[in-house]
Image: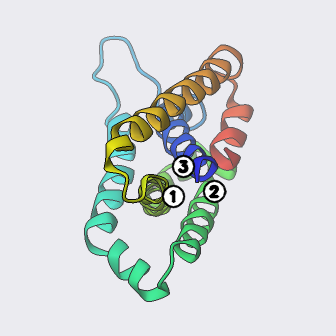
Amino acid sequence: HAFVYMMARMAVNVTMTLTPFYLIHVLDFKYIEGEPLRPEIATVPLASYTTSMLFSLFGYAALVRRFGNRTTPLLIGSVVTCMASVPFLFMCSEISWLVYIAASFQGVGLSIMLNIATSLISDVIGHDCSSSAFVYGTYSLFDKFFSGILLAVIGNTVIEDKDWLGWLCSFL
């Protein structure tokens, strides 16, 4: 359960953190001195968050009910996220509008993965409510540590490298 939770959280954290850098360095939505920030820097993550929220509200329960377990929806979420991430490897500034579609599908996949992963923590706790705060806190602490370490490594090595950002946004 812990591994699934950590991987889902890392996928969400890294994807949402790297998206603005991808937009700036790969799709060339650069900041120009004296001009307002490009709206895409905010609207692409907004598209991902919005579709994530809408799917969580209106589609997630039906998906879990349809399959009667959490393994199949977790796999579906992983596949949707992976398929939506592949275009990031091939996107260029000429077809940059496609980033909205890819980010929206990523949002749906990440939503499924994160909802499933969070519900798995409840399985660890079971009926022992006295330890629930400790368990949730421990999961959250390790999530912060591992995500922070991973993002520090990425930020100190390849954050401005156009090719690496494409690969990271596609496969991480």
Amino acid at the residue labelled 2:
Pro
Secondary structure, mark 1, is: helix
| Residue indicated by mark 3 | 5
Q: Name which residue lies at 63% across and 56% down.
A: 87
10 Å neighbourhood of mark 3: few (<14), some, or many (≥20)? Answer: many
Packing grade of label 1 (10 A; few <14, some 14-19, many >=20) is: many
Quadrant in which the N terminus is drawn: bottom right
Q: Which mark is residue 87?
A: 2
4 relative position to 32: left or right:
right
Counting residues from the start of the chain, the first of labels 2 and 3 encountered is: 3
In the image, is residue 78 above or below residue 34? below
Q: Residue at x 64, y 27 (%)?
A: 150
Q: Are marks 2 and 1 in contact (CB under 8 Å)?
A: yes
Instruction: Classify residue 149 by image quadrant.
Output: top right
Mark 1 — residue? 102
Left or right: where does residue 45 sit relative to residue 24?
left
Q: Amino acid at mark 1?
A: Ala
Whole-angstrom CA distance, mark 2 to mark 3, is: 25 Å
Residue at disc 2, secondary structure: helix
> Which residue occupies 67% across, 48% down?
170
Residue 37's image quarter?
top left
